[in-house]
C-alpha cells in the first residue's frame, strides 16, 4: 500500500507539482494499459472511475482481437469495462516529470462486479480464500532482464540482430562491470524507491548484460502491483537513457534465461509466521509441508501461469540455473522449488520455474491456489531431492512445451475450482492462440538450416 493519498495528489496538483495521472489496468500479459489524465480532471471526478474497451483483457502481445473468447468478441461489440482506481496504489512516478500513477480494478460496466478473468481479480480471489482461513501470503519476485547499449528503435530497425549488450562477459555479482552500467541501474533503484517501492539491491546476473533487481517482500497483491510497475518503470527509465531492456525469458540461445523467482510464505493475520516450527525438520511446520506438497502435486497444472509463451520454454535447459524438474530441495538451485531461510521465521519456499515474462498476478494466484489445495487436503510432502536435479531420474519434470502446459491447465480440476471454469477457459484460449500463432511462423533458424540443404 502506498502512503501517497488522494489528498496528497490534490495538493500536488493545486501547487503545480503534478499535471498528469496515469490510470492503469493490468492486461493478460502483465503490462500497464490505460489513460493519461489531466491531473485537474482526475482529482475532480476520474478518481472515482473511468472506462476502457473490454478487448484489453482478450488480446495477444500484438494487441490482436483474438477470436474464440466467450467474454469478448466482435459479436458482442467490444463494449466497455469500468476502470475503478484502487487509491491504495496511488503514487508519484519520479522518472516521469509531474506524473502520478494509480492501478485500477476492472469492473463489469453493467453490474460493477469485478471481471473474473482480469489478472488482479484472479489474485484477489485467492487472497480472500487465505483471509477466510485466517492467513495471508507474503511474496517477493526477483526480476532478471538484459540491458542493451542501444535504443528500442535501433534494435527494431536492425531486425533484432547484432544487438549490443551492456557488457561483453558474465557479470554475475561483478562490481566493476556493473559500475559501467550504474547510470541506468542507479536511476532504476532510486526511481522505484521514490515511487514507494522499497528496493533492496541490484546486481549483475549470470550472463553478459544481464541484471537483477530485488525489492522488499510484501503481501501478495501489493507485491504483484510492485512487479507490474517495476517492469514498466525499468523500460521507461532505460528508454530515457537511450538504452533498451528485455524481459524475454530466453532472448538468445547462447545466453542464460531471465527468471522471476517467487518467494512465498504464509503468516497469520496477526503476523505470526505459519511456515516456521522450531521443532520441525529444517524448521518447517506441518502447514508448510502441506503447502509445498500442493505446489508439487499441481506443478504441471500451474506451469502455464509461470511460463505463458512459446519462448518461455526455451529457458528450461539443464546446467543454466533454470530448472527442469518440479521437485523441492534444501537450498539447491538446480531444483524447481528451493527451501530458503531454514530454521528461521523467514523460512519460505522459492519457486524457480517462472520466467521474467510471467504475469505476476496470475503466477501468484496459481501458486496460492495449489498451496491452498495442499493445505485443505493435508497433502503429504515427499522427501527433498538431494544432489543435481538436472540428472535426476524418475522425478517430476516441468512441462517442456506450451502445448503440454496449456493442456495440463485446462484439464486441472483444482484450477477450475479455484479460478472458475470461465477463467480457465479464457486463459486456455490465450495459450492456444499463442501456440497457433507460432505454429504458422517461419523462423530464421529454419531458413538458415534448410534453405540450401533441404
Image: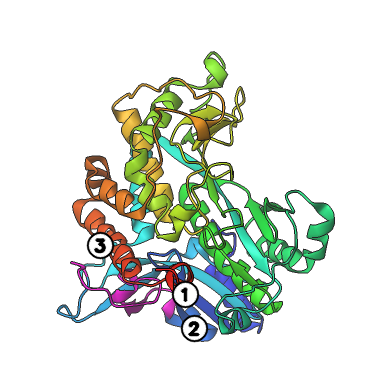
Report which quarter residue 182 is drawn in. bottom right
Q: Which mark is residue 429?
A: 3
Q: Which residue is mark 1?
A: 23
* Residue 215 relative to residue 394: left or right: right
Q: Position of residue 107 (x, y in %)?
A: 30, 67
Callout 3: helix, strand or loop?
helix
Kindly tell me whether residue 115 is visible in this rendering.
no
Q: Are marks 1 and 2 in contact (CB under 8 Å)?
A: yes
Q: Mark 1 vs mark 3: which is more N-terminal?
A: 1
Q: Position of residue 404 (x, y in %)?
A: 30, 49
Closer to the camera: disc 3 or disc 2? 3
Identify the image's colour scheme: rainbow, by chain, secondary structure or one colour: rainbow
Callout 1: helix, strand or loop?
strand
> Main structural element of the magenta stretch: helix, strand or loop?
loop
The residue range painted magenta reads 46-71
Q: Which residue is mark 2?
A: 37
Amino acid at each position: 500500500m502506498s502512503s501517497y493519498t488522494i489528498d496528497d495528489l490534490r495538493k500536488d496538483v493545486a501547487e503545480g507539482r503534478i499535471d498528469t495521472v496515469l490510470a492503469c489496468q493490468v492486461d493478460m500479459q502483465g503490462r500497464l494499459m490505460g489513460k493519461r489524465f489531466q491531473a485537474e480532471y482526475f482529482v475532480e471526478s476520474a478518481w472515482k472511475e473511468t472506462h476502457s474497451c473490454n478487448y484489453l483483457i482478450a488480446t495477444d502481445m500484438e494487441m490482436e482481437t483474438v477470436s474464440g473468447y466467450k467474454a469478448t468478441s466482435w459479436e458482442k461489440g467490444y463494449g466497455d469495462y469500468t476502470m475503478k482506481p484502487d487509491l491504495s496504489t496511488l503514487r508519484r512516478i519520479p522518472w516521469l516529470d509531474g506524473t502520478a500513477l494509480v492501478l485500477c480494478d476492472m469492473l463489469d460496466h453493467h453490474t460493477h462486479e469485478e471481471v473474473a478473468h482480469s489478472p488482479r481479480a484472479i489474485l484477489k480471489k485467492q487472497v480472500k480464500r487465505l483471509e477466510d482461513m485466517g492467513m495471508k501470503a507474503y511474496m517477493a519476485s526477483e526480476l532478471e532482464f538484459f540491458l542493451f547499449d542501444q535504443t528500442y528503435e535501433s534494435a527494431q530497425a536492425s531486425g533484432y540482430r547484432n544487438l549490443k549488450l551492456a557488457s561483453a562477459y558474465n557479470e554475475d555479482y561483478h562490481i566493476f562491470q556493473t559500475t559501467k552500467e550504474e547510470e541506468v541501474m542507479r536511476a532504476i533503484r532510486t526511481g522505484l524507491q521514490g515511487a514507494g517501492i522499497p528496493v533492496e539491491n541490484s546486481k549483475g546476473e549470470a550472463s553478459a548484460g544481464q541484471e537483477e533487481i530485488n525489492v522488499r517482500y510484501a503481501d501478495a497483491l501489493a507485491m504483484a502491483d510492485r512487479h507490474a510497475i517495476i517492469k514498466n518503470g525499468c523500460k521507461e527509465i532505460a528508454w530515457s537513457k537511450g538504452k533498451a531492456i528485455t524481459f524475454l525469458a530466453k532472448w538468445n540461445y547462447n545466453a542464460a534465461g531471465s527468471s522471476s523467482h517467487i518467494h512465498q510464505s504464509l503468516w497469520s493475520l496477526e503476523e505470526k509466521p505459519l511456515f516456521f516450527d522450531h521443532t520441525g525438520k529444517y524448521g518447517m511446520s506441518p502447514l508448510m509441508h502441506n503447502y509445498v506438497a500442493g505446489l508439487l502435486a499441481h506443478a504441471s497444472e500451474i506451469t502455464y501461469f509461470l511460463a505463458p509463451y512459446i519462448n518461455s520454454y526455451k529457458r528450461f535447459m539443464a546446467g543454466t540455473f533454470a530448472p527442469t524438474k518440479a521437485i523441492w530441495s534444501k537450498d539447491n538451485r538446480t531444483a524447481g522449488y528451493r527451501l530458503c531461510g531454514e530454521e528461521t521465521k523467514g523460512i519460505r519456499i522459492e519457486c524457480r520455474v517462472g520466467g521474467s515474462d510471467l504475469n505476476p498476478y496470475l503466477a501468484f494466484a496459481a501458486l496460492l491456489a495449489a498451496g491452498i489445495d495442499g493445505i485443505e487436503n493435508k497433502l503429504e510432502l515427499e522427501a527433498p531431492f538431494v544432489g543435481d536435479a538436472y540428472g535426476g531420474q524418475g522425478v517430476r519434470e516441468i512441462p517442456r512445451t506450451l502445448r503440454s502446459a496449456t493442456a495440463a491447465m485446462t484439464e486441472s480440476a483444482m484450477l477450475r475450482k479455484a479460478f472458475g471454469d470461465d477463467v480457465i477457459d479464457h486463459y486456455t484460449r490465450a495459450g492456444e492462440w499463442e501456440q497457433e500463432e507460432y505454429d504458422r511462423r517461419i523462423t530464421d533458424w529454419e531458413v538458415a538450416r534448410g534453405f540450401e540443404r533441404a
